[in-house]
Amino acid sequence: MEDSLSVVAITGNLGTRLIGRRVLYFPSLTSTMDIARQEVRQGAAEGTVIVAYKQTAGRGRLKRAWLSPEGSIALSVILYPRVAHLSSLIMLASLAVVHSIGAVTSLRPQIKWPNDVLINGRKVCGILIESDVRGDMVNYVVIGIGININLQVADFPEISPVATSLSEELGRQVSRLNVLRSLLVELDRLYLALSGGGSLYEEWRDNLVTLGKRVRATTGDSIHEGIAESVDRDGSLRLRGPDGSLTRIVVGDVTLRE
Ligand code: BTN
């Protein structure tokens, strides 16, 4: 499949108003998050996107590593949002991924709280949000997105029990360029909707595979087990414990138990 990434191929006739108006492309780098931070320090415009063919030191949530071999997509987007919109960015990023995969393929991904994207119960995309916020002042937000497009997860034993890729689900190669362009369009559309006062909460909640399931939630050093009952508008998860107690999880990770 003809799938070469370049700035011209990514941005040509993209039609976005903010996200992707400036794209930096690197065949290989440590982490798109590192370059994004450097760009922020140099005053990069909002909507600047850093794309890598391959990362050598990709970062995941909760200080984990993120594998970014050839065949995946790694990108970071620089934003300067209002503080009121911070908690919606998790929803924005995961919904944009769900929409773009749905636009380019017949697959129907779901979201595992807070923002993993799954297909048939396996992770196809991870999202990392890093920010510098002081009080009500947002200095910057970088949204990092990694999607497994054309890779055989069996080649990567460290992720193969829990991960999948678009090519694996479809039994054919998928254009990384089409997924990437569609993703930028969706990110742009949702970010403008959010900035214009729209809400992403209902759609994000309705796409969560987590709700109603028995889960184990890890937050800091604590582990909670129970039924994932609901999510609040700020994105936090409400977990009903076996003793009937309700715990609110703001930051953490969940494992589905059934
Ligand atoms: C996770 O699920 O733990 C989040 C993974 C986020 C990976 C992406 S790939 C692009 C960007 N650069 C990184 O180093 N990490 C994010």
Image (cartoon, rainbow, N blue to C red):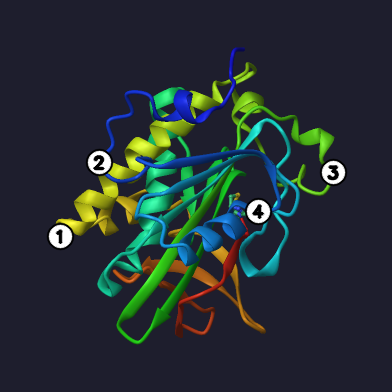
The mark closer to the camera, 3 or 2, is 2
Q: Residue 253: percent from the left, percent from the top? A: 58, 67
Q: CA distance from mark 1 to mark 4?
A: 32 Å
The mark closer to the camera, 1 or 3, is 1
- If you read the primary sequence from the N terminus, does the residue marked by circle 1 or circle 2 appear first? 2
Could you tell me the amino acid type at mark 4?
A: Ser
Quadrant of the rendered image containing residue 62? bottom right
Look at 62% across and 18% down and name the residue there.
173
Label 2 with label 4: CB-CB less than 8 Å: no
Q: Residue 92: percent from the left, percent from the top? A: 35, 53
* Label disc, if present, on residue 17 of the rendered structure: 2
Quadrant of the rendered image containing residue 68? top right
- If you read the primary sequence from the N terminus, does the residue marked by circle 2 or circle 4 appear first? 2
Q: Residue 57: percent from the left, percent from the top? A: 74, 54
Could you tell me the amino acid type at mark 3?
A: Pro
Reading the image, the residue beneath label 1 is 197
Q: Secondary structure at mark 3?
A: loop
Q: Residue furthest front?
A: 42
* Label disc, if present, on residue 157 of the rendered structure: 3
Q: CA distance from mark 1 to mark 3?
A: 44 Å
Q: CA distance from mark 1 to mark 2?
A: 17 Å
Quadrant including the N terminus: top right
Quadrant including the C terminus: bottom right
Q: CA distance from mark 2 to mark 4?
A: 26 Å
- If you read the primary sequence from the N terminus, does the residue marked by circle 1 or circle 3 appear first? 3
Image-based side of 242 in relation to 53, left or right = left
- If you read the primary sequence from the N terminus, does the residue marked by circle 4 or circle 3 appear first? 4
Mark 4 neighbour density, 10 Å: few (under 14) some (14–19) many (20 or more): many
Residues 41 and 201: in front is 41
Q: Secondary structure at mark 1?
A: loop
